[in-house]
Amino acid sequence: MRKKRYGGTPDKKRTGKSTPKADRELSLDAQSWLHDAKTCLNGGQGTVDDDSRLVAALAQLEAAEVPVAVRELTQATGEQSLPLLQYMTTQDEPNLSYAATDALGLVAELEAAAILGGVHRNSSNKQLRKRARKSLTRLKSLGLDVDSFLEDTGESFAISHLPSTTPNAWVSTIDGAGNQLVIYSKIVPMEGLYALHAVTNDKLGIVSGTGGRTSKRQLRHFNTHVSSEDEVELLEVDPEYARYLLTVARKLNTATDTPVPSDYVSLSFLLGDEEIAGNPVDIDSLLSANGSIGDADDGRKPEAILRENAFALWSLPHEISHKYVEQIKEIEEGWVITSGDVEEDRIKNLLNSATDFIFSMEERQLYRARLANMAYLLHLQDKPDVARDALQVAEMLGDESREAHLIPFARALVAGSIVADYDRHCVADEPDNDEDEEEQQILLLSDDTVKILRSTVV
């Protein structure tokens, strides 16, 4: 009988992976609900609104069909069902919360144990607590370490006092505008896995924050999507390093009066209250370990890091580079007949003055910190030579005795941004085919000018 199979004592030889009744034994309404639920949870794309809708529809089924449908859904979707099951454990209707608590014992994941631990410690329903303990015992038999969740203290615990698990974190490389994606995930006892996705900017602070309850599969799907669709490489890092980045960024929000996104604020509890003493990576030690950078030519050009994929998006803002595009056009159009050397000197002098102006000491310190952090990320990518070059450039930028235009990296970045903007400008300014050839020639750069500009780019 169903009561014996799903609500009574299971056979001793059975495990949490026993086969439930097939879809055909459910009513058409129950089968429809099961199909809808599988569709919502497939690929880890279920939302809180989906949870609410599915639970409301589940409550309309025959009472005896609820545990059967929930069990089949859990076995079909695994960890993807955890957010829905967690939501169900909070329902006042015992048939829903019991079914979810029993089904959680089928998912051999620490997130399931965390949810059950919260129910076991905090629920006022004695029968529900008993079911949670039974499911935890089942998870223990499947190899999970759930002892901390099985502790019976006899009192209700606040979330902050419940056992927590080691968080995970990922970061992207830093783009040319100083933006970086930071992802921080953590299991919240009584609720399951949560993830915080924040975009930080090294001038403004935290500029975007999203996230919420999730599952391992949803998190993997998000990370894969970011890597493939947005072409952003994510690197797994020490969670303390991620916390440090977010702490520094949050202070920048205060210093620059930049509002902290409300979604970030609502999820900041994941980071805990413990203060971060400093950068756990200790980048200053990395700089010192690489020694002083002299003027000896070892055959390497640290500025060549701009060719690396990690620096592909490093460019000056359009409003800055475009100003110098116009100045170069004025130089070219105002040329009198002079030697090629004189013409080249004019272009190079403009690049020098632009580099010195753009790379003020304040800007140089910003890029120094940016490059030092990039060196750590390059180290994680197993690119020690490129990481060393990034550290060398960072030290050059921090050398106040060196003028900016004498730092090859700074000059190459400025020249490369001007060339890229000039290319876009020329394409945008190309006239229609109906215009005569003479007018088209006036708008294009001469080959000599293009050659001069590109010779400065790495």
Image: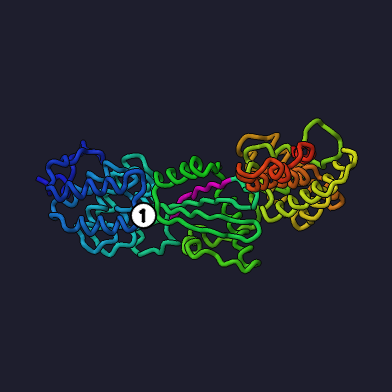
Please give the name of the residue rendered at 46% of the width and 43% of the height, measured from the top-left corner.
Answer: 225
Question: Quadrant of residue 50 in the image?
Answer: bottom left
Q: Amino acid at mark 1?
A: Glu
152 lies above or below 423: below
Residue 217 in the figure: left or right of residue 454: left
Question: Quadrant of residue 232 in the image?
Answer: top right
Image quarter hosting the N terminus = top left
Please give the name of the residue rendered at 19% of the width and 58% of the height, measured from the top-left corner.
Answer: 59
269, 228: nearer the viewer: 228
Secondary structure, mark 1, is loop
Q: Residue furthest left?
A: 1
72 lies above or below 323: above
Where's residue 288, x and y in %? 77, 44
Q: Which residue is mark 1?
A: 151
Whether residue 233 appears in this view of the structure is: yes
Instruction: Read off the magenta span.
Output: 163-172
Residue 236 in the figure: left or right of residue 193: right
330, 265: nearer the viewer: 330
Q: Residue furthest bottom?
A: 257
167 magenta-colored: yes
Please give the name of the residue rendered at 26% of the width and 53% of the height, measured from the top-left corner.
Answer: 100
Where's residue 96, x and y in %? 22, 57
Label 1 crowd (10 A; few <14 / some 14-19 / many >=20): few
221 lies above or below 212: above
Where's residue 108, x and y in %? 34, 42
Residue 13 in the figure: left or right of residue 366: left
Image quarter hosting the C terminus = top right
254 magenta-colored: no
Q: How many marks?
A: 1
Where's residue 430, x and y in %? 64, 45
Question: Quadrant of residue 444 in the image?
Answer: top right
